[in-house]
Amino acid sequence: MFSLRPDVIQLYGILTVTAFDTKDGRLFRHTKKNQVTDLGREVVLGLLLQDPAGDVYQQNPEYNQIWSLSVGDGTTPPSRDDTGLDNLLWTSVIARATDYTITYSPQWEIKISKVVPAGTLTGSNISEVGLFTRGDNDVPGLASNKRLYARQVHAVVPKTPTMIIEYEWRLGVTVQI
């Protein structure tokens, strides 16, 4: 008898946070797996089923684009049911030509790189980061229907005026046949 063995697909993300102070050369680096949220899983399903008669995300697949990276100072560990950051401090749109790359086989990954520049958020204690979808507006603060795709907390980084913080987020799928 013949049996069907389904492919197993798993979403994953790996976040690397690097903080570098241009004045004294201090360096901080931290890498950990992210939490893909339930909303993030719905994003993937909405992209698979682009139904003009379906829900707002199926009718408008562009709403599901990974669109912005946001940072905050929250410390609550991430969970699957997160819908936002604990305390959002800064958001930046992911520039399509410069802030991401896609690799295929064997890794099947999107790599997003985003920098919180020197002089931004001076005096803040940055400890959380999230990726959000586009929603219905190109300006993240004005978009409704945006969704949190993934979130993670990291060690607190006290932001100085001369510090640069780089977030490198690798999102991918593993396929087991």
Image (spheres, rainbow, N blue to C red):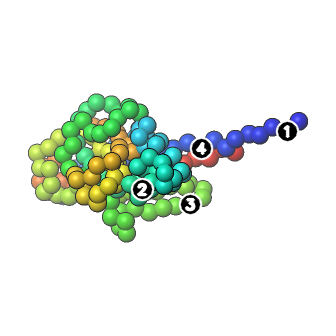
Q: Quadrant of residue 67?
A: bottom left
Instruction: Give the mark, 1 or 2, whose residue is nearer the N terminus.
Output: 1
Mark 4 vs 2: CB contact within 8 A: no
First in sequence: mark 1 vs mark 3: 1
**Residue, x 54% and y 51% (percent of image)?**
48
Residue at 17%, 57% in the rendered image? 118
- Where does residue 152 sit, x and y in percent of width and height? 34, 39
Quarter where residue 35 is shown = top left
| Residue at the disc numbered 2 | 60
In this rendering, position of residue 169 left or right of residue 27 = right
Mark pair 1, 2: CA separation: 40 Å
Res 17 seen here: no
Of mark 4 and mark 1, the one earlier in the sequence is: 1
Circle 1: element type: loop
Q: Which residue is mark 3?
A: 104
Q: Amino acid at mark 2?
A: Asn
Residue wearing tag 1: 2
The answer to whether the residue labelled 1 contacts the one labelled 2, judged by CB atoms less than 8 Å apart, is: no
> Is 154 on the left-hand or right-hand side of 7?
left
* Comparing labels 1 and 2, the label whose residue is closer to the camera: 2
- In the picture of the structure, the residue carrying the numbered disc 4 is 9
Disc 4 crowd rating (10 Å Cα; few below 14, some 14-19, many 20+) is few
Q: Are marks 4 and 3 in contact (CB under 8 Å)?
A: no
Percent position (x, y) of residue 140?
Answer: 26, 54
Disc 4 to disc 3, how far (Cα)? 15 Å
Q: In the rendered structure, which disc, 4 or 3, sits on the residue that comes first in sequence?
A: 4
